Image: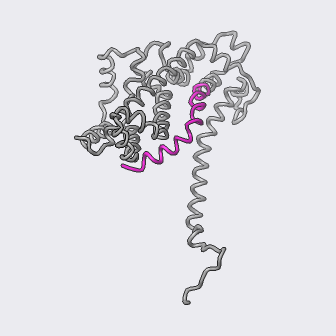
Amino acid sequence: MGARMMKPGKRSSAAFGLSPGERALGAVNVFLLTIIGLMMVLPFLNTVAKSFSSNNAITTGKVIFTPVDFQLGTYKYVTGQSQFWDSLRVSVLITLLGTAGAMTISCLTAYPLSKTWLYGRKPVILFFVFTMLFSGGMVPNYLLMRSLGLINTLWVLFVPGMLSVYNVILLKNFFEDIPEAIEESAQLDGAGNIRTLISIVLPMSLPALATIGLFYAVGYWDNYMTGLLYITKPDMRPLQTYLYVIVTEAVNVDETLSMDALENIALNTEAIRAATIVLACVPIMCVYPFLQKYFVKGMRVGSVKG
């Protein structure tokens, strides 16, 4: 025979191994991802360290990634402020209401658009995509909210963001991957469109729903601009808007510090801002690990089709 038979147990390096170029590319990817990861993690570690460090350690620049002169005074002070708890309550409320409402509207929008037989489907999709590229701008949006009487109300904090075209497209793509035979069998048993959506489609779409839900929840939780534009009452500010004020207006922090706190705890305004940032991150960090397994799968499946 002209061709040599490969001995059993041996594998061709060209067929199953990696070429030198692929190994080099993998090493570069690992290096870049490591650098990007450190750029994300190290500033947060520095913030956590400052929140637990003393005033003198922060002022002299001794704090890097571990606390120096460990203390809990900053957290006691931040959690002792009534405005912090008011803002936390507002953020939790708008995150829950906004995410629930946004998921309902997104599912009811994406499900019909996933049907190729829907009359006028393409023009509607093009209209949705158009809104991703062009918008009225900040001033027209403010005038609209004012004309609707939503200024200084909770409604203005979550109603305008209840529909994300990007999330609708992800859901639409995921719904399109569900076999039509399953839905047809449900309809033969007498199920209508709404019953099919609730009993068949949504249970089969948990990865996509978890992904989109996390998108909406993080978006509502991290949104500070809406509260900055439409809310003037301090007790109605979301937590991120309150944090924005604390971080950018250090004078306000200095004015709110009592003499007892300064004498007994030796608080530092930078430590107060760091503690507020950490406390604002804790709720969403507690939720993410439970949704991570759905998050990766939902992003991969929902973004395959266009």
Residue 217 percent across, percent down from the top left: 49, 30
Q: Residue 279 magenta-drawn?
A: yes
Q: Nearer the viewer, residue 24 or 18?
A: 18
Q: Residue 236 magenta-drawn?
A: no
Region rendered in magenta: 277-306
Q: Establish if 35 lies above or below 133.
A: below
Residue 9 percent across, percent down from the top left: 66, 74
Location of residue 120 (image quadrant): top left
Residue 189 shown left or right of residue 245 in the figure? left
Q: Residue at x 67, y 29 (%)?
A: 50
Residue 67 percent across, percent down from the top left: 73, 31
User: Which image quarter holds the N terminus?
Assistant: bottom right
Q: Nearer the viewer, residue 219 or 99?
A: 99
Q: Establish if 254 lies above or below 19.
A: above
Q: Which residue is drawn at 64% across and 13% down?
A: 80
Q: Residue at x 43, y 36 (%)?
A: 202
**What main secondary structure does the magenta stretch of the protein show?**
helix
Residue 280 shown left or right of residue 130 in the figure? right
**Residue located farthest toward the right when viewing the structure as drawn:** 69
**Residue located farthest toward the front when viewing the structure as drawn:** 189
Location of residue 23 (image quadrant): bottom right
Location of residue 10 (image quadrant): bottom right
Q: Nearer the viewer, residue 151 or 194?
A: 194
